[in-house]
Amino acid sequence: MSVFKKVRNTLRLLKSVDLDQLAKINQQIDLSEAMKSLGQLDERQLKGLMKMLKTKRKKGQSDLPPIDGDFYNLDLKLSEDQRKLQMEVRNFMEDQVRPLVNDHWNRAKFPHEIIEKFKKLNITGVPYKGYGCPDLPFLMEGIIAQEIARVDVSISTFFGVHSGLAMGSIYLCGSEEQKQEWLPKMQKLDAIGAFGLTEPNVGSGVAGGLETTCKFDGENWVLNGQKKWIGNATFADVIIIWARDEDSNQVKGFLVRKGNPGFKAEKMEDKMALRIVQNALITLTNCKVPESDRLQEANSFKDTAKVLQMTRAGVAWQAVGCARGAYESALKYTRKREQFGRPIASYQLIQNHLVEMVSNLTAMQTLVFRLSEMQDAGLLTDEHASLAKVFCSMRTRDVVSRAREVMGGNGILLDYDVARFVADAEAIYSYEGTKEINSLIVGRAITGYSAFVS
């Protein structure tokens, strides 16, 4: 038997084990070593092992394929170390986060206790060089975003705001002194970050319409205005605030520290999506910030846009994770739920919905995989990131809708997870640039004409 066939059969064997079993196995043995050992088995030994596993199924249960949203086996493109990290994050989310998210989502509370547990994964600031960061490819940042969102989009948003938007702003726009002060402790999650750009009256038009102002009084920068929808801001140690300079009319960035006089963050209530995320309405009233806390390399909105371009790929990966979580939950449900004496997964109409879902999911996965490859190669542009955000957020809406449909009335209960994915998909659809704005960015790139209103 060829080495390729052995590896392929080994992967098929592992995919026949569900996630709960895989997590338990991983606690007892080194899966990477187990993979090597399985790859050394001959065809007779492999068949015997697969037969032994199958005999453990419940009496009368057919040999069903694994529940796996990676239909095109994109995980085979990852290195052994990358795959190991992916599974560490997946197991962590299954063991530590899944048991508590529905309760916290329902109560709109953030599970602060998971921050200490997250530290052990060492996945913060994945693509950054230095300052204690892992310095891994952007692809792995996407894989991590997908794995977190596959269980809960709120936790993925918390992580993306901190590791992507907040740390990214300092990494791209901060001075060396600012990087040394903040990035090492943010990487360790000893300090939490937030990102304040959106305002009550300004969302898509932030490039030229920021109402929050800053003015240098000879000693300090004085900030006035409001920010809205700012994730993590109720408990963050540092909030990146973007404001328009009254003198130059250019956008500048500031590190506003927790407890800074003139800074007030009020938790936003009554959200229908991302209920675990602690979004805040920030009010800045003559908030004084020293020159040393002005992001030294942020001198116009073009610098702000660099941060948004870098993180927008991560939002597309979040959409993929949301869709994958909904699809896998729905598939699991339809194989257990019986009507008219048979699992509903055996009926044509249900299978049609499931195929539409996995088709959308697979298209999204291949798109973001290529997007991250381009980002790692230095080829990523605004329009590339925007196309991924447009397509993935739209297709995710379709996937979660079909997942809810095949589950009937149970699809609106938190107990089955899909209701949470349906709601959270609406937030993904709107943040980091609406569908319309991102469409205009792509439209400008392919036609050569700008349709933005000046």
Image (tube, rainbow, N blue to C red):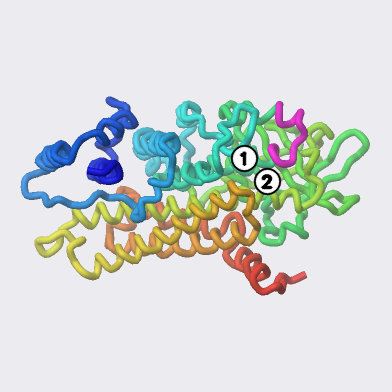
Q: Amino acid at mark 2?
A: Gly
User: Would residue 105 appear left or right of 294 to someone viewing this image?
Assistant: left
User: Would residue 26 appear left or right of 81 to someone viewing this image?
Assistant: left
Residue at the image position 25 percent from the left and 42 percent from the top:
6
- Tell me if residue 77 comes above or below residue 386 in the rendering: above
Question: Where does the C terminus fall, quadrant-wise?
Answer: bottom right
Residue at the image position 54 percent from the left and 50 percent from the top:
372
Residue at the right extreme of this rendering: 218
Residue at the left extreme of this rendering: 59
Helix, strand or loop status at disc 1: loop
Gap between marks 1 and 2 measured at Cα: 8 Å
Helix, strand or loop status at disc 2: strand
Residue at the image position 76 percent from the left and 40 percent from the top:
254
User: Would residue 260 appear left or right of 347 to someone viewing this image?
Assistant: right
> Which of 151 and 411 lies nearest the eye of the viewer?
151
Q: Which quadrant holds residue 430?
A: bottom right
Find disc 2 in the rendering and name its residue.
196
Q: Is residue 171 magenta?
A: yes
Task: Tell me if mark 1 has few (under 14), some (14-19) or many (20+) residues whose alpha carbon lies within 10 angstroms of its own.
Answer: many
The numbered disc on residue 233 is 1
